[in-house]
Image (tube, grey):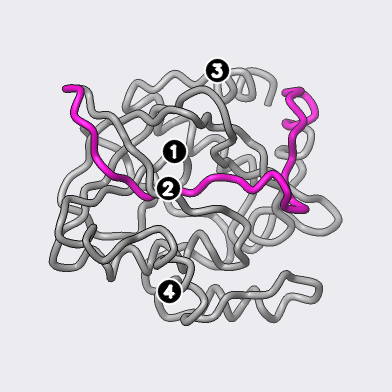
Amino acid sequence: MKITKKLNDGKIKLTKNNINDGYIREFISKIEGSDKVLTDKELIEERDKILPPSIMNKNLYVFAYGSLIWNPTIDFEKQVLGKIYGFHRSFCMLTKLGRGSYENPGLMLGLDKGGSCKGILFKLNKKDALKNVDILFKREMVTKAYVPKLLNAHLKNGKKVKAITFTVDKNHKNYFGEKCYYKKINLISKASGFLGSCKEYLKNTAKSFEEINIKDKEILNLMKIL
């Protein structure tokens, strides 16, 4: 399975080094009005809420449904198609920082409750699984906008595996529950931040889905009216 890696077009690149050394978190913390940035200690506490110590002796996967597919920023043993139930992919999280601004907030993908979602499962190497999980939390949980979960993911052969993924918090101030595609594309088409534009984020995701033959109704409809 071939997925073309795509790097964001913003002035700050979303790379493993920029995430792991704290550069992106530091940059966000200096933006006036930004939410509180989690410390290393707080990120580990969030990680430990969903990962029992015993899980590190088993095969652990990361479920990617958006930009993680085309820019994972973690090391992994292999990647396979997978599916989770109980959540669906949607542009449902406002962003006023990375790919938006306070004047023109953008929209990011999240996992909202209900339905199912196809994506990519990255199998982590047992020897450095925790290290890569921590990189993942530094990327996705900068301001605690998502709710990390350890879910059952289903492989094509019917096997179930444990996978870390990030769902939306419907009580968060940035949750966007509007279903209208035109309202969503109005936000996406205008928004840009230090990581780049929301339009680029949508296009990169759509292109990657074409490469791995994932047909997502919302992505397809948004691309039609972009």
Whether the residues at callouts 1 and 4 have beta carbons within 8 Å, the answer is no
Q: Residue at x 39, y 51 (%)?
A: 71
Reading the chain from its start, which is encountered first: label 2 or label 1? 1
Q: Position of residue 111 (x, y in %)?
A: 54, 38
Name the residue that disc number 1 marks: 65
Is 109 situated left or right of 226 in this image? left
In front: label 1 or label 4? 4
What is the number of the mark on residue 217? 3
In front: label 3 or label 2? 2
Residue 19 placement: quadrant: bottom left
Reading the chain from its start, which is encountered first: label 3 or label 1? 1
Reading the chain from its start, which is encountered first: label 3 or label 2? 2
Magenta residues span 157-185
Q: How many neighbours does mark 3 have within 10 angstroms: few (below 14), some (14-19), or many (20 or more)? A: few
Q: Amino acid at mark 2?
A: Thr
Q: Residue at x 82, y 59 (%)?
A: 102
Q: Position of residue 32 (x, y in %)?
A: 79, 76
- What kind of element bears circle 4? helix
What is the number of the mark on residue 165? 2
Name the residue that disc number 4 marks: 44
Q: Residue at x 16, y 22 (%)?
A: 157
Whether the residues at callouts 2 and 1 have beta carbons within 8 Å, the answer is yes
Q: How many neighbours does mark 1 have within 10 angstroms: few (below 14), some (14-19), or many (20 or more)? A: many
Q: Position of residue 21 (x, y in %)?
A: 42, 80
Residue 118 lies in magenta, yes or no? no
Residue 220 placement: quadrant: top right
Cα separation between marks 2 and 4: 16 Å
Cα separation between marks 3 and 1: 14 Å
Cα separation between marks 2 and 1: 9 Å
Cα separation between marks 1 and 4: 23 Å
